[in-house]
Image: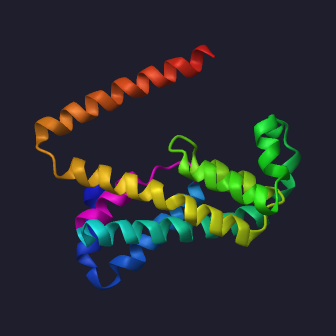
């Protein structure tokens, strides 16, 4: 996927930035597709700092567009049975400083799906500007960590890449088993 996006960006260099933003918005709207392959393509085409900046702008724009569209389309789902968990209810009912703090914290945590946070905040009481600023601010450390990690992996020798993939797979299996036993 990364190579396909790199080819697209290199074929349309004059609009590569816009294409990256559009792809990031689509990823945000889908809510479950990881953006790491797009970050990798951005880093390959725009360089380390340029790629991080483009990825950050795309994440911020994607979260904003997703919030607005989710709010328009899904607000009536607020009373769904699956949303009755106390932690979900806390974000649904939060507004002002409390919403800002919750969204900021959830954006910084690496294992909390961004799409889920956006969805719950959009159908709850959170104002758009509160969401946008908390989400964008919380994305700074997440994008920096993702960008530097992907950059290091891209520039690794193939042996180290394989080792990193094996370690990541082992950790993923371990974490998923821990969650299943709870």
> Which range is magenta?
31-44
Q: Dominant secondary structure of the magenta stretch?
A: helix
Left or right: residue 88 compared with residue 144: right
Quadrant where the C terminus sits is: top right
Would you place residue 86 above or below residue 52 in this image?
above
Query: Residue at 41% of width from left, 66% of height from top?
Result: 55
- Residue 6: horizontal and vertical position, in percent? 26, 65
Query: Residue at 39% of width from left, 71% of height from top?
Result: 54
**Number of marks present in the image shown:** 0
- Residue 2: horizontal and vertical position, in percent? 30, 56
Query: Residue at 27% of width from left, 80% of height from top?
Result: 13
Residue 115 is one of the magenta-drawn residues: no
Would you place residue 132 above or below residue 150 in this image?
below
Q: Residue furthest top?
A: 181
Q: Between residues 6 and 160, which one lies in front from this camera angle? A: 160
Color encoding of the figure:
rainbow
């Amino acid at each position: 996927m990364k190579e396909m996006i790199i080819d697209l960006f290199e074929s349309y260099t004059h609009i590569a930035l816009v294409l990256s933003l559009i792809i990031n918005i689509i990823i945000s709207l889908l809510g479950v597709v990881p953006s790491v392959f797009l970050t990798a393509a951005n880093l390959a085409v725009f360089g380390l700092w340029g790629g991080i900046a483009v990825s950050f702008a795309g994440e911020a724009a994607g979260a904003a567009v997703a919030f607005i569209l989710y709010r328009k389309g899904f607000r009536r789902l607020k009373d769904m049975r699956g949303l009755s968990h106390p932690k979900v209810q806390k974000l649904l009912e939060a507004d002002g400083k409390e919403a800002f703090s919750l969204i900021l914290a959830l954006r910084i945590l690496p294992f909390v799906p961004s799409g889920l946070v956006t969805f719950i905040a959009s159908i709850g009481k959170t104002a758009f500007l509160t969401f946008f600023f908390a989400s964008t601010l919380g994305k700074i450390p997440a994008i920096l960590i993702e960008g530097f990690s992907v950059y290091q992996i891209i520039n690794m020798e193939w042996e180290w890449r394989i080792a990193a993939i094996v370690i990541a797979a082992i950790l993923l299996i371990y974490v998923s088993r821990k969650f299943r036993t709870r």
